[in-house]
Image (cartoon, rainbow, N blue to C red):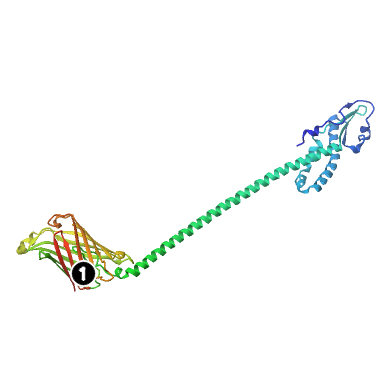
Amino acid sequence: MMIKRLLLPLVLSTSLLFSQEIPDWAKNRRPENPGKYYFGIGVSSRSEGEADNNARIEFTRNVQTQVETMIDHQISEDKKEINEVYNRQNLVKAELSLKGINVSERYFDSANKTWYSLIQYEKDAYQNLFEEELKREAQRLKAENKALEDKKREEIRHKQEQEKIEAEKKRAELQKQKEAERLKEEKLRRQEDRRSHIQRNYGDFIGMPAFHRLLTMENAEIIGNKFIQDLSLKGSVYPASFLGMKYSIHFKVASATANFSMKSDTLLLQDAIFKLRLLEGKGEIYRSSVAIGAGQYLLSPINLKDLKNSIEGAKTEYTVAAFANVHIPQFHLVNSLQADFRQAKLGAAWYPFFKSMPELALLLELDIVWDEMWRNRHNDLFIAQPGLLFTVIPDRFFARFGYEQNEFATLNLDFQF
């Protein structure tokens, strides 16, 4: 945009002459001292305005060659800066050639009805204005280019920053995954080390089948892998008396047990349980077994002296049962469970000297008896029964000592054949 400095006062004031003598510039078609000025002379037989326009065309044509020479000189001086300005030189030339340029002088030849118009501008003043405008244009474009370059640099910086952030995120995620994998591997390694340690130090205990009963309860074990019979006799140590017996037959995955409890000539309690093993000694560390069962039991005592009438009047009930046991090798401990409609029994067999004396185990049985018929004579709901198991002849003869029903010190002799 041309600044107001282009509107500097012209050297010659504009005037319209009606004198009879034609001016030299109209007669010769050039001003006095033509080398000092850029000029254009317009002639028209139609109107003054047409003469003015023709003068502007001539002025522009005259200036055009001079401006191109100035631009070429400017480019040769500063190619880097003016190179972009050169692309807009035509716009600059048009602005400098026409904007702010007024008609310097007019003449009307009344005899020939011809209008003459003169536009002239000192070359030095015009050249100075052009160079200043060209520099301003270069500075403006340079500022625009700098802004664009700054914007591009900022976009590149922002893109690089985003890429850096994304790369950091990916590295962090990868590190997180690696750490998770490392922790997982470490956990698996610790578990394997622990398993190996337990297998190495407690392998004999883990491989040992649990004894199939504690004091008054059964667990999920089935004796052996073939047909085996088991007879258990129970007596009171003090006062000395016979308390009852159990007889069992064991197959590979099942067993059947009949239990009798006596007092004098009266059969106080009787039940029969069939047990089916579902899970046999599973687990590398915590050896576990599970079984289910069904049973029948008496609701009233039977007097052996009046056996016929007692049996005819006897009432029975049926129940289902669940059995389980699990080895805790770190403590040389076997925990057991028996539960049915009458009661629930929790038991523990602890082998405190397993390395040197695996034949000996300390027993503890905790009973919850909600069927009053099966409670002791004190009508206790909860009963704790401690005892001791001793293997006299492996797989053949066992002895169990205990304190049962909060009343009897008992001896149980178990025979397998």
* Quadrant, the C terminus: bottom left
- Quarter of the image where one finds residue 279: bottom left
Residue 192, given in percent of the width and then of the height, sits at 39, 66
Q: Is residue 80 left or right of residue 267?
A: right
Q: Bin the neighbour count of mark 1 within 10 Å (Cα to Cα): few under 14, some 14-19, many 20 and up.
A: some
- The part of the image, by quadrant, that contains residue 387 is bottom left
What's the residue at 4%, 64% (across, down)?
Answer: 305
- Which of the pair 18/178 is nearer the observer? 178
Q: Position of residue 3 (x, y in %)?
A: 77, 35
Which residue does the image show at 94% across and 35% down from the upper left? 28
Q: Nearer the viewer, residue 46 or 80?
A: 80
- Residue 340 can be seen, yes or no: no
Q: Residue at x 88, y 27 (%)?
A: 16
Q: Nearer the viewer, residue 345 or 46?
A: 345
Residue 357 rendering spot, x and y as whole percentages: 25, 71
- Residue at the right extreme, as displayed: 21
Q: Is residue 172 visible to the viewer in this orientation of the structure? A: yes
Residue 96: % across, % down: 80, 38
Answer left or right for 246 relative to 41: left
56 w.r.t. 260: above or below: above
The amino acid at mark 1 is Phe
On the image, which quarter does residue 294 sit in? bottom left
Position of residue 278 in the picture relative to residue 189 (left or right): left
In the rendered image of this protein, does residue 123 appear above or below residue 178?
A: above
Q: Secondary structure at mark 1?
A: strand
The residue under label 1 is 390
Could you tell me which quadrant the N terminus lies in?
top right
